[in-house]
Image (cartoon, grey):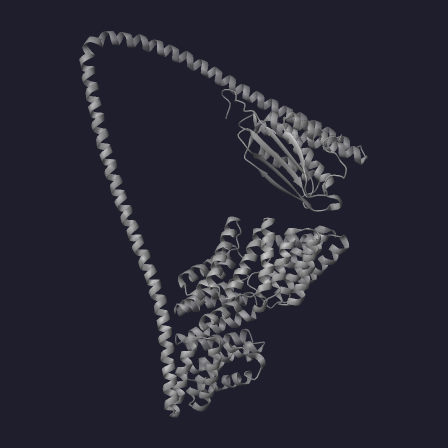
């Protein structure tokens, strides 16, 4: 149990600050944002650029020691400009960007203040999507075991809100953090089940950055002792990070693979992956990562009896990365002492051991039993090697106390063995026997545990192989049986065919003489008649096919000419706008142009399509909406969400339907989002029954003016929508809710296509 606690503590220490909330941007995207920052005006777009650049800087430096001053400056500029413009969404995003900066610097109070401010603004604006991010950020600002209940509450709230507004990334991140908390609480199987659900959620929604979830699954399986699964998931994390070019945490993922190989006692492979982790840590200037990777390589080199290589590595690292803090100095001194002891260079070991003794006086080791155990064991080995058995016994007893606190059974066994040697050298026979007995008890326990795991793994492999052999045998038997059945069926068919053919030949031979002359004459006459009719029929069919092709091309030409004529009318209207200054008149002309464009699109679709009588509604509605959003210059402010089924409708239905969509979207773009307000427009067209259809249009804008009676209003837009709905014999309704919501239900009578037309 204590060994499990140790593994959990070590894993928890390496999973903190595990995944940046905002992924790093591609290089070309960063260049585009920088150009906009240099040239763009001080508007809401500039706020969004500043926020995006701030997030990217933090994500790229998440594991390095580089200062994040520029990222903080960008976030504060975005905050000030948003406040000046009254841009609430920008204020919220800049609050979260600041919180992200402070989280990277592990400044919990400042991060909490910024996240809480963004959350409060989101809830005031009823912005559910941003509120979900706020609750998640707030949970990230707490990181102690005592805060677990509070964090679970915040992540649960974030996941619920994200699910309501279909934000799978925020939902998955929240669920993953909850699984991480359960992992740190020792609820490993629950954590693994939750992480599997997160993985399924990400895959369903096409989220590519799966490596952080693979990483947690690998750690959980490793602690559970399921090393094959741990290796599978940790290697998957490396592959996913490499494939998506998200290399911020690649050093951590390499170290995870190395840890699993170390637990499998495959030290050479572990060293290879620790070296990859070291190389990646150096590339991102992570002092902690460099120290940990170097220490792990040295530890494993000594275990495979290569202290010379360990010493050479430490010397190179000391030259390239001089230690800047007590922890780095301690790890260097510990590694040097062990390397010198392995090389039996005791004079040099005396210097590094003296440095270890000096560092023992700092606050670094206070309550850090893991480091205490390591340092005291190293000093104990040094004193044993130099035959100072009294000091060896003293420090090794301290090592036993520290190891018992963390519960590492292998280290506890080895420490008792070292104490046995110290006592034996001093002639303390009873303590020596007691320590050796304790050593044997611990090694037997470890051996039993490892054997149990190995036996379980072997049993699983045996059962798997047995099942695969059984499946292979059944498959082979089935194939043989199917081959026998096929051969018997072929033989039976051959016999029946031969019998039938024989009977036919006998019948023909019997009648041959009697019918030969008469049959020949009759057949010749019939053949001539058939040839004549075939020629006439082929000529008629050729003429009909030509007429149909000519008719189809004529219809396409008509549609083309109608489209061109409508385009000319549109251009004439556009030319008139050059001489007009009245905004109301210009708006009317623009609306007329949009209506003409909607009808022109119909004719364009008809002469371009194979079926000149029906219109693909997915493409038609998308082009209408894109044209309207572009004509009102609203691409950055208004988001469109189209949910149009793969439906083809007759031109007599598609034309009024397109005009209804044109009027509704035009009204939303004109009136729903005043003063540059952001918003969204949703359009769906579904087939509810064989001949029944439903069109829905909705925006989240300011809604209809108070007191407006939509059924009796004489405004041109609403009048056209009602008239076109009546033309479709449809049922038009305006539904309550935020913004404007329109629903049109109509029935389309099936119409048979003319003969010869494409279906």
Q: Would residue 752 appear left or right of 47 to someone viewing this image?
A: left
Residue 446 shows in this picture: yes
Q: How many marks?
A: 0
* Front residue of this view, candidates 427 and 314: 427
Q: Residue at x 46, y 68 (%)?
A: 274
- Tell me the residue at 48%/84% (across/down): 398
* Left or right of 559, for residue 704: right
Q: Residue furthest bottom?
A: 427
Image quadrant in which you'd find residue 649: top right
Q: Name the outermost residue toward the right.
A: 582
Percent coordinates x, y for residue 721 in the rendering = 69, 30
- Left or right: 340 in relation to 437: right
Q: Is residue 473 left or right of residue 602?
A: left
Is residue 61 visible to the viewer in this orientation of the structure? Answer: no
Which of the 4 quarters of the picture holds residue 181? bottom right
Q: Quadrant of the N terminus?
A: bottom left
Q: Is 663 rendered above or below residue 265?
A: above
Q: Position of residue 205 (x, y in %)?
A: 53, 49
- In the image, residue 560 sits, relative to residue 642, either above or below, namely above
Residue 275 in percent (x, y) is at: 47, 68
Residue 592 vs residue 30, the one in the foreground: 592
Relative to 368, residue 474 above or below: above
Q: Residue at 29% x, 46% y: name it.
A: 475
Q: Position of residue 148 (x, y in %)?
A: 57, 65
Residue at the (63%, 24%) spot, across then down: 561
């Amino acid at each position: 149990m204590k060994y499990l606690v140790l593994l959990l503590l070590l894993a928890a220490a390496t999973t903190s600050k595990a995944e940046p909330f905002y992924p790093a941007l591609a290089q070309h995207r960063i260049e585009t944002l920088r150009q906009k920052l240099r040239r763009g005006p001080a508007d809401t777009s500039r706020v969004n650029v500043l926020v995006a650049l701030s997030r990217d800087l933090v994500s790229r430096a998440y594991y390095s020691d580089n200062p994040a001053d520029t990222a903080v400056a960008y976030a504060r500029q975005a905050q000030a400009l948003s406040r000046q413009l009254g841009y609430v969404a920008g204020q919220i995003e800049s609050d979260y960007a600041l919180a992200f900066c402070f989280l990277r610097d592990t400044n919990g109070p400042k991060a909490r203040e910024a996240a809480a401010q963004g959350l409060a603004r989101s809830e005031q604006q009823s912005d559910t999507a941003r509120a979900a991010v706020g609750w998640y950020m707030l949970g990230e600002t707490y990181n102690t075991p005592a805060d677990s209940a509070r964090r679970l509450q915040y992540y649960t709230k974030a996941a619920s809100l994200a699910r309501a507004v279909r934000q799978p990334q925020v939902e998955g991140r929240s669920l993953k953090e909850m699984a991480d908390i359960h992992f740190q609480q020792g609820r490993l199987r629950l954590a693994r089940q939750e992480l599997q659900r997160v993985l399924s959620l990400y895959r369903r929604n096409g989220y590519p950055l799966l490596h952080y979830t693979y990483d947690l699954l690998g750690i959980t399986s490793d602690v559970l002792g399921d090393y094959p699964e741990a290796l599978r998931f940790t290697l998957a994390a490396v592959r996913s990070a490499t494939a998506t070019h998200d290399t911020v945490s690649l050093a951590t993922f390499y170290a995870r693979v190395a840890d699993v190989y170390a637990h499998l006692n495959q030290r050479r492979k572990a060293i290879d992956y620790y070296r990859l982790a070291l190389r990646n840590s150096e590339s991102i200037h992570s002092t902690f990562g460099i120290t940990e990777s170097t220490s792990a390589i040295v530890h494993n080199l000594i275990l495979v009896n290569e202290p010379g290589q360990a010493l050479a590595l430490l010397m190179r690292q000391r030259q390239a990365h001089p230690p800047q803090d007590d922890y780095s100095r301690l790890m260097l001194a510990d590694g040097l002492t062990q390397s010198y002891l392995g090389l039996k260079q005791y004079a040099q070991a005396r210097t590094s051991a003296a440095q270890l003794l000096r560092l023992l006086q700092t606050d670094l080791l206070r309550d850090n039993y893991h480091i205490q155990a390591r340092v005291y064991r190293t000093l104990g080995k040094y004193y044993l090697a130099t035959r100072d058995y009294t000091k060896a016994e003293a420090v090794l007893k301290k090592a036993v106390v520290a190891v018992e606190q963390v519960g590492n059974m292998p280290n506890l066994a080895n420490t008792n063995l070292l104490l046995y040697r110290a006592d034996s050298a001093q002639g303390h026979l009873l303590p020596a026997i007691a320590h050796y007995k304790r050593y044997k008890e611990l090694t037997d326990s470890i051996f039993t545990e490892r054997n149990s795991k190995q036996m379980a793994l072997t049993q699983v492999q045996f059962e798997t192989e047995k099942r695969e052999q059984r499946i292979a045998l059944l498959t082979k038997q089935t194939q043989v049986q199917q081959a026998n059945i096929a051969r018997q069926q072929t033989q039976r068919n051959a016999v029946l065919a031969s019998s039938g053919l024989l009977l036919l030949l006998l019948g023909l031979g019997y009648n041959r003489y009697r019918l030969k002359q008469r049959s020949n004459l009759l057949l010749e006459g019939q053949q001539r008649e058939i040839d004549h009719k075939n020629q006439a029929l082929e000529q008629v069919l050729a003429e009909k096919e030509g007429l149909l092709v000519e008719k189809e091309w004529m219809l396409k030409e008509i549609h083309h000419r109608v489209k061109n004529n409508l385009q000319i009318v549109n251009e004439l209207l556009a030319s008139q706008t050059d001489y007009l200054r009245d905004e109301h008149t210009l708006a009317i002309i623009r609306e007329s142009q949009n209506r003409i464009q909607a009808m022109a699109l119909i004719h364009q679709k008809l002469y371009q399509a194979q079926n000149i009588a029906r219109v693909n509604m997915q493409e038609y509605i998308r082009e209408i909406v894109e044209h309207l959003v572009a004509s009102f210059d609203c691409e950055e402010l208004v988001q469109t969400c189209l949910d149009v089924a793969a439906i083809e409708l007759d031109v007599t239905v598609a034309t009024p339907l397109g005009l209804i969509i044109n009027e509704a979207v035009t009204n939303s773009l004109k009136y729903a989002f005043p003063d540059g307000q952001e918003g969204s427009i949703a359009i769906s067209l579904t087939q509810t029954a064989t001949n029944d259809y439903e069109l829905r249009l909705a925006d989240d804008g300011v809604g209809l003016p108070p007191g407006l009676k939509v059924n009796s209003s004489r405004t041109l837009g609403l009048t056209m929508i009602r008239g076109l709905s009546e033309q479709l014999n449809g049922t038009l309704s305006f539904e309550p809710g935020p913004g404007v919501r329109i629903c049109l239900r109509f029935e389309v009578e099936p119409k048979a296509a003319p003969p010869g037309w494409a279906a």
